[in-house]
Image (cartoon, grey):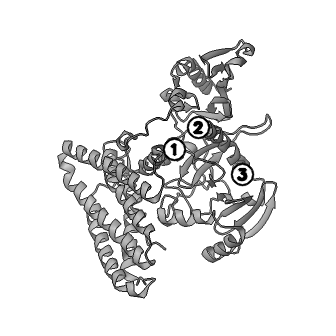
Amino acid sequence: MKRKILFWALTSVLVIMLTACGGKAPKSGGNEGTSTANHDTAIKFDAAYDLKNQGFYERFIHYMELDKTSLIDTLQQDFQEAPVEGTDAGGAWLKLEKAGLVFHLTEEEGVPVSHVDIAEISPVHFGETKVGMSFAEIMKRAGETMIMASPSGEEEEKEFSLIYPVKGASVVFSSEQVFEKSAKMMVSSWGYYDEEPTLFSAREIRSYYGSFKLPENWVGRISLENSVDTQLISFLGQKGAYPLVQIEYSHPSDGDSRLDDVQVVLENEDVLITAKLWSNEPADKKEAEQYRVMRSEVDKMLNTFKWELQAADVESTPPTACQVTDITEVGEISAVFEAYLLEREEDNSEAGIDEAYAELGQCYTDKLDGFLTENNSLKDLANELRTSISDVNSYWFELHYYADGGGTMWSHLSGRQGSTIDAAIYGYLRQQESEEGQLSNKAEFNKRLQQLSEYRDYYDQNPVEALNEEDQALVDEAVEQLVNSYDALIVVLNTMTPNRAAVDLLEYLSSYDTGE
């Protein structure tokens, strides 16, 4: 129980510290590179700089693990640009003017870089999201999550954020105006915390004691401000946040001093949960009407409270692989696998993680087989994708194993990535059933297919040298097999309808890049 209490407190602190570490409007030279978006220019994405691209992400996150001296040398070598050093009230930073990156340094042991600001001029992006978008557009592309509000003083503009946890860090978008195309972006280390943060749900409010289900029409229209013992839910209008209800968690012994204008949600020997309704309508008539509708739904929302502390008091049985959230689109794979690893609470060794991936991978193999039983016409396509993607996976990792001098890391990564293949195909086929998944996106499809072809051409036209001379023959053979497997995969992909689901599958395949 102590561990869960700690995580709840740290999750609350995360939003506050993200703001303190650079989420607010620029205050120093360390943030000058972030500007508003040029709305007249179409947003372009380069898969080589995608934080969802495993190869690029691992190289990027490595910068955040370097001490200052090593970081300066590495940045200068990788970007051919000398970092500018500076210091302000927030601490020291290193800035790459041309690359549009600002690395904020700490003096904390094990956390040399707290976060990296990503400016508009930077090519770095997260899937199909980047600096200068509205929150609605970001959530449409990156997935629904709760809009978090940072506590602020009476004279300060409230800062809002969307937090997308990834392995070893979080991608954070922040803005003072959620409906404007003004989001700033940073990659933040979670090294300050004992446990990795998880994705906030947009459809429920969770605490250590339990959860509230939110009405459907609240999704994307409210913000949540967390502190240690309170949660403030506010309606989001064009000119700010308007409080709807404040939920407070206290000890039952504090009940004698409760205010008259609060209602009791739950009271037992462990906790007193109360709610205070606000009445602070926006001036805009349309927004005021929406606010009143949502305020009328607060009582219904409070009645959905689900008590969960009792389950935390005993060692609950970890979820089995097939009890995890179902996948309905390709983009959910990473979050589902990461969530299962966090909830599994078993062997966290490399072998244990391999086993977890295999367990969940088998679950989606079974789901895919079941889906194809009911959709027999899709079997040929699914089996062709299975074979061609599996071949690319095998030969890509085999090549890098021999080219980089071996090591067990490559076998771990190959097995884990291979375990996600059926999940990706299953997600693609499920996504094809949705209206959004069927939306035509030929330009992006062709762009990403061309990128995959360029990966193929890179290996075909550039010699790959083995780190150990005696492995060169094995490298040459792996290159030939990899090129052939790319060819087979591209043939299959060319038979697919160029829609959003196919684009997302190609994004999944972008991890099989040149490795440069």
Q: Residue at x 48, y 53 (%)?
A: 348
Q: Is residue 178 left or right of residue 154?
A: left
The picture places residue 243, in percent across and down from the top left corner, at 67, 27
Distance between the Cα atoms at labels 3 and 2?
Answer: 25 Å
- Residue underneath mark 1: 139
Q: Amino acid at mark 1?
A: Met
Q: Amino acid at mark 3?
A: Cys
The picture places residue 119, in percent across and down from the top left corner, at 64, 59
Q: Nearer the viewer, residue 362 or 68?
A: 362
Distance between the Cα atoms at labels 3 and 1?
Answer: 23 Å
- Residue underneath mark 3: 21
Above or below, 239 against 116 in this view is above
Q: Amino acid at mark 2?
A: Lys
Let me know if residue 186 appears in the view: no
Distance between the Cα atoms at labels 2 and 1?
Answer: 28 Å
Let me know if residue 71 appears in the view: yes
The picture places residue 151, in percent across and down from the top left corner, at 72, 37
Secondary structure of the residue carrying tag 2 is helix
Q: Earlier in the sequence, mark 2 or mark 1?
A: 2
* Image depth: mark 3 or mark 2 in front: 2
Q: Earlier in the sequence, mark 3 or mark 1?
A: 3
Q: Nearer the viewer, residue 309 or 367?
A: 309
Total number of numbered discs in the rendering: 3
User: Marks 1 and 2: in contact by CB < 8 Å?
Assistant: no
